[in-house]
Image (cartoon, coloured by chain):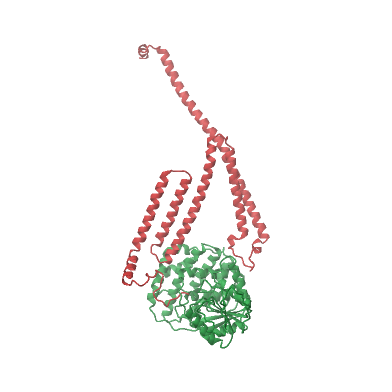
Chain colours: A green, B red
Amino acid sequence: MATADLNPGVITPSAPPGNGLLVLLAAMTPEQLDSVFAKLTVSFPGEELLIATPDAISEALPASAHPSFRIVAAPASNTAWTLIATDFVNAYQLAEKHEARAILVLGSESGSLSSFALRQLANAALGPTDLAVPCYDLPPHAGLVNSAILYPLTRALFASRVRFPLAVDLGFSLRMAKRLADAAQHFTAINQGETPLWPVNEATEAGFTIEQFDVGSHVQSSRPDFNTIFPLVIASLFSDIKAKAAFWQRFRPLSPAPIAIPMPPAPTIDTAADIAPMLSAFRLAYSNLHEIWSHVLSPNSLLMLKRLAATDAAAFRLSDNLWARIVYDFLLAYRLRTINRGHLLGALIPLYLAWVASHFNITASGANPEGHIEAVAAAFETEKTYMVSRWRWPDRFNP
Amino acid sequence: MQNILAVLLQLDPNQSSRSLFAGDTSIWHNMADALHQSLDRVLLLLIAVLPGILAFLVALAVFTLIGMAVSALLRRGLAAAKLDERLVDERGNSNWAPSTSPTALIARASFWGCVLLGLIIGVLAFDASYATTAILSSSLLPYLTRIVGAAVLLIAGTLIARFLARSVLIGAVNEQLQYARFLSLGIKWLVLVLTAAMVLEHLEIGGNIVGLAFGILFGGIVLTLALAVGLGSRDLVSRSLESRAEHPGQSSAPPPTAIADDSIRHF
C-alpha cells in the first residue's frame, strides 16, 4: 500500500525501505513525476520503494496510483539544474531518518533516462560502489561547459574519467552521503546552501569507489541564464580545487576507461552562423578586456590570443594546450585573488566562447566531437606540471 | 630757489631743508622699521611653527620605524608559531591567498597601527607647540582632520570608481554592447566627479561654485551617456518595435548573447 504523507504535522514512525534504497526526487511537474514513477515501476518491479519528493503533499499524487511506493515529504530545492549543498544535507538526513543504505537522487528530467539505467545506478549504490554517476548521451552541441572545463579539469587534477562531474542524477552509498553532507555543512553553516558540490572530487579524495554508467539521452527543458550560472559553477569548482590542493598536487594514474564513451556523429548544421556571434564576442572582449587578461594570462598566451583575434572565422582554432593554460591561469588568479573574483570569472566568458567556436570549427571539419574533447582533456593532463609549479611558487612568475 | 620758496612759505629755508632731509631719513627709517618688524613676525612665526613640524616628522618617523620593527617581529614570531597552519578549518583546508594569510594581515595591521599612532602623536605635538590663543592653532588642527577625511574620501572614491568601471566593462562586453568601454569610462568619471565634489565640499573650498559646477558636469555626463546609449541602441529598439508590431503575441527579442540555434546548450 502506498502511504502518501498527507498530514505533515503528524510524525509517523519511519520504517527502513524494503531494499534499503531511498529515492530522492527533485521538484517536478505532474507530467514529469508520472514519467519518473512509470520508469521506477519498470526498474523496480514489485519492490517497495521509499520515495522522497517535495510534491508528496500535492493533491496530484493519488495514493493508489503506485501501491508499491512509500512516499514521504522532502524539502524543496531552490535550484533545478544541479544538486546543491542543501540537497546533500537533506538527502543524508532523510536516509538516516528512514535507515536507508543507499540514496538515488534524480533530477527533474530523470524521466528521460532509461529504466535500465536507473536500476544500474541504484544497484551500484546498494552494492560495493560508493558513487554511481551517469554518462549522458548528449547532442554534439550540448554540455559545452562540461566538455570545455569541468571534465578536463576533474580528469587532470583528480585522475577521474567521470564524463559529467556535475550530474544531477546520482546514486551513492550512506557513507558517501555522510561525506557529502559533511562537506555541504561547511556551506550551509555560512548561509551558502545553494553552492554546487562536487561529488566526484569528494569521492576521489576520500578514496571511495566510483562507477560510471551509460544512461542514454538526457532531455533538459530548462535553460538557465548562462552569464549568471557560468561564474557560479566555475567559482564553485575553483574553490573546491583550491580546498583540495594537497590532494591533487600528487601524481595519480588515470583510472582506465570503464565504458566506451558514445561517439555521436559529426553535426550537420550551419557552423558559420553559430560561431559568428561567439567570435564577435571574443573580438570585442579582446579589444576591451585585454588589460584585465594581462593581469591573469602569460605574455605568450596573450600573444596567441592576439593572433587568434585577427584570424578568419573559418580558420579559427584555439589550440588545446593554450586553452588548458588559460583555464589554469584563471584558476591560479582565482586562488591568488589577483583581481576581484567576480570580474575574473566574467572575463573568462569570452575566452570560453572562443573555445566553443573553435570546437565547432574542428567538428565541422570532420573531427569527432568526443574525440576533440578527449584531446582537450589530454592537454589538461599534459599542462598539469605547469599548473603545479605555478601553484607552488606563485611569485616566480606573475604576468 | 630754496630761499625763494622759504620766503614765500615764510619758512626758514635752512630749517625746511633740514626737515626735508630729516623726513627722508625718517621715511626710510620707518620703512626699514616696518620691514624689520614684518620680518621679525615671520621669523617668530617660523620659529613657532618649525618645532611643531619637526616634532610631527620625528614622531611619524620614530613610530614608522617602531612599526617596521614590530611588524617584522610579529611576522617571525607568528611564522615560528605556525599560526597559518593552526588556523585551517576543520577539514584541514586553508581558505586564504598567500598574500592575505593571518600572519601577513596581523603584521601589516600592526605596522599601519604604529604609523597611525605616530601620526596622532605628531599632530598633537604640532598643536602643543602653539599657544592656545593662537588663531593658527585653533583653526589648523580641525582643518588637518578635514584634510585626512578628504584624503580618505578621495581614496575610497577612486577605488569605487575603478571597481564599478571594471564591473560595467565586463558586464557590457559579455552582453556584446559595442560601446562597453565608453560606458565604463562614463561610470568611472561620474563617480570620480562625485568624489571630487564631495572632497572639495568637505574641505570647504569653493562654496556654492563647486556644487553648481558639479551639478552641471554630472548632468552633462549623464545626458551624454543617455544620448550615446539611446542613439547607439536606436537600431535595436526600432527592430524590437517592428517585431512586436508584426508579432504581437511573441516575447521581446532575445538578448545579444543568445545563440540562434536552440541545439547549443552550454550546460
Residue A97 relative to residue B200: left or right: right
Residue at image point 48% right, 44% down = B203
In the displayed structure, does residue A56 sit left or right of residue A304?
A: right
The image shows residue B119 at horizontal and vertical percentages of: 58, 46
User: Which quadrant holds residue B7?
Assistant: top left
Residue lying at the far right of the rendered structure = B81
Looking at the picture, does residue A115 appear above or below residue B267? below
Report the front residue among B93 and B201: B201
State the residue in front, B234 or B11: B234
Residue at the limit of the structure toward the bottom, as seen here: A46
Q: Is residue A399 visible?
A: no
A276 sits to left or right of A16: left
Q: Is residue B225 above or below residue A160?
A: above
| Residue B185 visible (yes or no) | yes
- Location of residue A170 by image quarter: bottom right
Location of residue B210 with respect to A295 vertically, above or below: above
